[in-house]
Image (cartoon, rainbow, N blue to C red):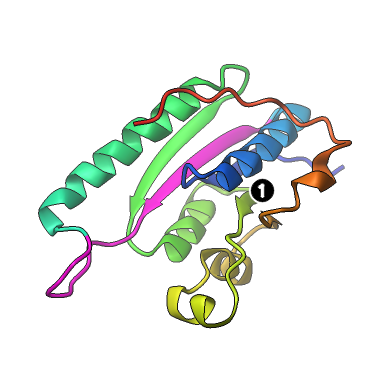
Amino acid sequence: MFRLLKILVPVDFSEDSQRALSVARSLALDHGACLILVAAAPPPPATAEPFLPATEYPGLIAGMRRDLEALAADITDLTVETHVLGGSPGPSIVALANDRNADLIVMETHGRSGINRLVMGSVAEYVLRHSPCPVLTMRPGTEHHLQGLQVAPMTTGSQS
């Protein structure tokens, strides 16, 4: 029997991410698995005109940690780990999946294509290509496919 013990869920606090977390939570409940929630902060920019000054980067990490821990606190029926990683999101997620021996990664995609994908890259594509375990991806706009599934409801705590 296929048994899931550790399900890793990258979280960016978007609605799409919440749907992926809800599906992962249902799977974790069905299998008695631990949820591993991860937020990946992009590395601080090295350009002369950064979108976020390097002095504000520690504050970004602290805010992400606070938000992720609040999200985890709302999940009282499962064991939940939280990790906030710096660096490039794709490689950071794959490294954590390796380190924690994840059995499954459940994540959203942002549905970028064409020039946006070339410029922005695709975290989901990177994870799909390099993951040590199966990856379940959820594309925006496909939630109607979940209508008949028993998806565990998520309560949303206050977010800063």
Residue drawn at (66%, 32%) of the image:
25
Query: In this image, 123 relative to 24: left or right?
Result: left
Query: In this image, 10 relative to 68: left or right?
Result: right
Tell me if residue 5 can be seen.
Answer: no
Q: Residues within 10 Å of mark 1 (few under 14, many from 20)?
A: some
Figure quadrant of residue 61: top left
Figure quadrant of residue 26: top right
Residue 88: percent from left, percent from top: 37, 64
Quadrant where the C terminus is found in the figure: top left
Query: In this image, 107 relative to 52: left or right?
Result: right
Residue 55: percent from left, percent from top: 10, 52
Magenta residue span = 33-51
Tell me if residue 106 can be seen.
Answer: yes
Query: In this image, 73 relative to 31: left or right?
Result: left
Residue 18: percent from left, percent from top: 58, 39
Residue wearing tag 1: 103
User: Which secondary structure lies at badge 1?
Assistant: loop
Q: Would you place residue 150 above or below residue 24 in this image?
A: above
Residue 139 in magenta?
A: no
Q: Would you place residue 124 above or below residue 102 in this image?
A: below
Quadrant where the N terminus is found in the figure: top right
Residue drawn at (81%, 45%) of the image:
144
Residue 132: percent from left, percent from top: 61, 61
Q: Amino acid at mark 1?
A: Asp
Residue drawn at (20%, 42%) of the image:
59
Q: In the depicted view, which residue is nearer to us: 59 or 113? A: 113
